[in-house]
Amino acid sequence: MKKTLFIIIAALCALPAESEVLTNQSIIDLVALGLPENVIVTKIETSECKFDTSLEAIKKLNGEGIAGNILVAMMSASHDAATAKKAEENSKSGIYYIESDSVQKQVLPTVFSGTKANTLGAVFSAGIASTKVMAIINGPNSGMQVRTSKPEFRFVFNAETNALSVTDWWFSSSNSPRQFALVKLKVKKNDRQLQMGKVNAYAGLDMSVDQKAKIDFDVEQESEGVFRVIPKTPLEPGEYCFFFQGTLPSKSVSNNSVFDFSVPGNE
């Protein structure tokens, strides 16, 4: 019986403790226990931390009697966590909307629901007039709203994590935002449309985005494979997208998606 009890106790002691996360309240509690400052600093340096180090939070901690070297350790831990988070975000290929210095949201690709061509002009001109080929995107608005007329985006091209897949082949086949076009979409009642090209009985097929709808943008390289993209001029309220114009990686892959976003009228 004693042997069985010993085995059970040993097994319980071997179980891993729940993940502990230090917060501002944790530090206040540790100080209230009368622990030495160097012990609390070491605890901060060796634990997972989630501190609020805003100006108001620091004022409150100071009022609670938290020593300066403990506050420094808390701010250092917060900075390290923010740096690690940014590095992790920048390691995944994609396009991100920079909402603030600490928040960025990934702009996901939206698949075309189909294509159509307006043949009326060609019929009346006996094929002389070009027929526009339009790609259709379901819905009159994008789910990604940027809420500013001068949005900033981050393009991440990470060769180590890229693969030829549905979600990231654009970034496997390119290494610069210059291989994408920023385009304003035509909004209809139930969908959005992008001119993918035009066809003419004499000139043949021209697969290119409408130049009149393209918007110039500035590109600034932040680090290897990471670029910041900003439109040269403020964007009017409407629907927009980034469209890949580079070479397709293989015949089995089609360029049938865009990275779309909205600029609302009441920013």
Image (cartoon, grey):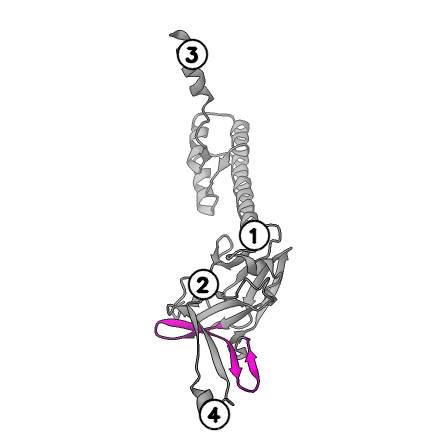
Q: Amino acid at mark 4?
A: Ser
Looking at the rendered structure, the secondary structure element under dot 4 is loop
> Label 2 to label 4, Cα distance in Å?
35 Å
In this rendering, the count of numbered labels is: 4
Q: Is residue 42 magenta?
A: no
Name the residue that disc number 4 marks. Answer: 125
Q: Is residue 164 above or below residue 202?
A: above
Q: Position of residue 211 (x, y in %)?
A: 54, 78
On screen, residue 191 versus residue 198, left or right, reads left
Find out whether the residues at labels 2 and 3 contact each other: C-beta distance under 8 Å: no
Residue drawn where x is 44% and y is 43% of the image: 57
| Mark 4 crowdedness (10 Å alpha carbons): few <14, some 14-19, many ≥20 | few
Tag 2 residue: 110
From this viewpoint, is residue 93 visible? yes
Q: Quadrant of residue 169?
A: bottom right
Of labels 4 and 1, the one closer to you = 4
Q: CA distance from mark 2 to mark 3?
A: 60 Å
Q: Which mark is residue 132?
A: none
